[in-house]
C-alpha cells in the first residue's frame, strides 16, 4: 500500500507541473493529457483497492455460505477473486433441469449433462436410424468441442470443470467471492473519479461539467439518475419479457441462490455494487 500511495503522490505532483501548461487545442497536448490520466487512474485505482482489500476479505469470510481460503493465503485468495465461474458449484441442479421443457433437454446442450442418447418417446418417428445415429455423433462432437473451448477460455477456474457443471457460459461465483470482485470495481471507480477531479481542477480548459460530473442541484442529479436507470431498466425488462413470450426463456425459480446457505439479498447487493463500479468507469473514461 505504501508503494501505491507514493506512486499516486508522485503522479499527482507530475500532473500539477504539466497539466496547467497543456494547450488542449492541439492533438499532442491531448495525447499527453490522456497518458497522464491513464497513469493517474491506474495508480489511484490500485491504491483504493489496497485500502478496501483487507476489510472486504474479512467481511466476506463472515458471510453465510462463505468458502474462502485462509485470510493469510494470498495466492489462493487472489486466484479465487479472479474467478469467472466457480466449478465447485453444480448448476443447473437436477431439480432445475426437471422444470425445463423436455425438448430443450433433448435438442440443447443440457442433454449432454444427463443423457447419452435421445429418449425414444420424443424421437421423431419419421427419421431413419441412420439419421438418428448421425445426429448423436454430431451432438457428441459438439460436447467435445465445447469442453475443449471451456477448458481453454475459462482460465479463472482453479479446478477442472465438467460439462454438467456448466452447460453454458455464465458468471457463477459465491457471494463471498462476488463481494470482493465488487470492491475491486468500486476501487477502480474511485480511482477514476479522483483522477478526473484532479485533472479538471488543474486544467483551465476542462471542467467537471464538461465530462458530465457537474452538479447544478440535487434535484437535477436525482432526475438524471432516475432517467438513466429507468431507460436502461425498461430496455432490459422489455427484452426479457419478449424472450419469455417467444418461449426462449423458462423461469424455473424466484429469489433463489445457487449455494443454499447464501443470502439472496446480500448476493444481489454485491452484483449491484459491482455494476455500479463498472458503469462509472465506462461512462467517465
Image (cartoon, rainbow, N blue to C red):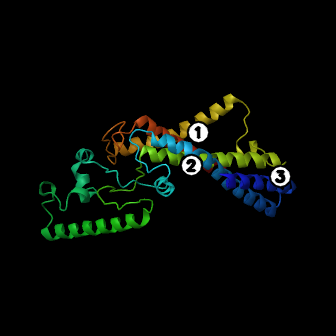
How many other residues sit within 10 Å of disc 3, few (<14), some (14-19) or many (≥20)? some
The residue at 68%/45% (across/down) is 193
Towards the viewer: 240 or 194: 194
Vertical arrangement, residue 233 with respect to residue 284, above or below? above
Asked if the residue at tag 2 contacts the one at tag 3, i.e. Cβ–Cβ closer than 8 Å, the answer is: no
Coordinates of residue 222 in the picture (x, y in percent):
63, 31
Q: Which of marks 1 and 3 is in front?
A: 3
Q: In the image, 275: left or right of 202?
A: left
Mark closest to the chain's N terminus, 1 or 2: 2
Which residue lies under the disc numbered 1?
228
Coordinates of residue 68 in the picture (x, y in percent):
43, 48
Coordinates of residue 38 in the picture (x, y in percent):
69, 57
Quarter-wise, where is residue 190 in the image?
Answer: top right
Residue 67, disc: none
Instruction: Spot the residue most to the right.
Output: 21
Towards the viewer: 254 or 102: 254
Asked if the residue at tag 3 contacts the one at tag 1, i.e. Cβ–Cβ closer than 8 Å, the answer is: no
Vertical arrangement, residue 112 with respect to residue 192, above or below? below
Coordinates of residue 96 in the picture (x, y in percent):
27, 45
Quarter-wise, where is residue 268 in the image?
Answer: top left
Mark closest to the chain's N terminus, 3 or 2: 3
Which residue lies under the disc numbered 2?
184
Towards the viewer: 88 or 279: 88
Which residue lies under the disc numbered 3?
16
Mark closest to the chain's N terminus, 1 or 3: 3
Amino acid at each position: 500500500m505504501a508503494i501505491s500511495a507514493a506512486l499516486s503522490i508522485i503522479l499527482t505532483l507530475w500532473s500539477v507541473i504539466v497539466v496547467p501548461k497543456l494547450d488542449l487545442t492541439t492533438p499532442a497536448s491531448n495525447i499527453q493529457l490522456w497518458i497522464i490520466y491513464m497513469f493517474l487512474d491506474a495508480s489511484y485505482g490500485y491504491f483504493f483497492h489496497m485500502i478496501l482489500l483487507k476489510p472486504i476479505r474479512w467481511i466476506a469470510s463472515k458471510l453465510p455460505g462463505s468458502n474462502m481460503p485462509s485470510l493469510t493465503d494470498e495466492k489462493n485468495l487472489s486466484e479465487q477473486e479472479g474467478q469467472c465461474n466457480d466449478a465447485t458449484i453444480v448448476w443447473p441442479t437436477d431439480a432445475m433441469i426437471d422444470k425445463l421443457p423436455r425438448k430443450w433437454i433433448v435438442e440443447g446442450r443440457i442433454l449432454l449433462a444427463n443423457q447419452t442418447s435421445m429418449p425414444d418417446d420424443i424421437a421423431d418417428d419419421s427419421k431413419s436410424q441412420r439419421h438418428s445415429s448421425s445426429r448423436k455423433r454430431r451432438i457428441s462432437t459438439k460436447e467435445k468441442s465445447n469442453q475443449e473451448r471451456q477448458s481453454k477460455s475459462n482460465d479463472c477456474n482453479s479446478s477442472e470443470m465438467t460439462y454438467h457443471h456448466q452447460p453454458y457460459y455464465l458468471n457463477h461465483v459465491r457471494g463471498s467471492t462476488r463481494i470482493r470482485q465488487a470492491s475491486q470495481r468500486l476501487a477502480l471507480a474511485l480511482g477514476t473519479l479522483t483522477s478526473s477531479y484532479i485533472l479538471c481542477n488543474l486544467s483551465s480548459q476542462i471542467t467537471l461539467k464538461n465530462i458530465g460530473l457537474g452538479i447544478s442541484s440535487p434535484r437535477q442529479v436525482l432526475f438524471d439518475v432516475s432517467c438513466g436507470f429507468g431507460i436502461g431498466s425498461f430496455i432490459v425488462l422489455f427484452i426479457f419479457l419478449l424472450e419469455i413470450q417467444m418461449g426462449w426463456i423458462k423461469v424455473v425459480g424466484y429469489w433463489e441462490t445457487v449455494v443454499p446457505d447464501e443470502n439472496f439479498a446480500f448476493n444481489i447487493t454485491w452484483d449491484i455494487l459491482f455494476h455500479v463500479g463498472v458503469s462509472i468507469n465506462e461512462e467517465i473514461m
